Amino acid sequence: MNVSGRLSAEISGASYADIEGNTESLKVDANGASKMEADQLRAKNVEVEASGASHARVYATESVDAEASGAGQIDCEGNPTTVRRSENLGSNVNIR
């Protein structure tokens, strides 16, 4: 999938999504026990939130704004130059 603008994805409950391709901007909102596999979707800018027991994997080349809460887990690849992260007890944000 190639998107020239902004791609937005919301998943919740026990859902699963796997997205690949290229986009300028990606926004992910994952909650519940959901899993988002977007590490094969190359994005310049990523905004990602993971709450509950959700897990989101993304790929950002320029910037990432990652917020994890509850037992949420976020993994970001692509070595973005600008990083903003927020995590609380029980959650985890990994930037590579």
Image (tube, rainbow, N blue to C red):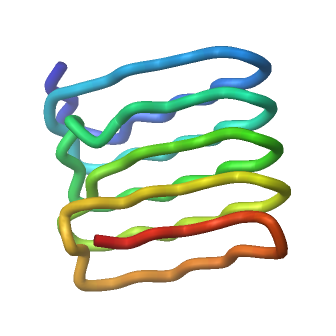
Between 48 and 7, the one lying in front of the other is 48
> On the image, which quarter does residue 83 sit in?
bottom left
Q: Is residue 65 left or right of residue 13?
A: left
Horizontal relation, residue 77 to residue 89: left or right: left
| On screen, residue 23 above or below 33 | below
Image location of residue 93, percent across then percent down: 55, 68
Of the 4 image quadrants, the one containing the N terminus is top left
95 vs 65, left or right, is left
Image location (x, y in percent) of residue 69? 79, 61
Q: Which residue lies furthest to the front in this view?
A: 90
Q: Which residue is drawn at 36% across and 48% down?
A: 58
Q: In this view, does 66 lie above or below 30?
A: below
Q: In which quarter of the image is the C terminus?
A: bottom left
Whole-percent x and y of residue 59? 27, 52
Quadrant hosting residue 63: bottom left
Foreground: 2 or 95?
Answer: 95
x then y, percent, for residue 55: 59, 42
Above or below for 45 versus 17: below
> Relative to 14, does residue 25 appear above or below in the rendering?
below
The residue under the point 77% across, 49% down is 51
> What residue is at 23 percent from the left and 37 percent from the top?
41
Residue drawn at point x = 68 percent, y = 39 percent: 54
What count of labels does the image hold?
0
User: Taking 34 as reference, is 94 left or right?
Assistant: left
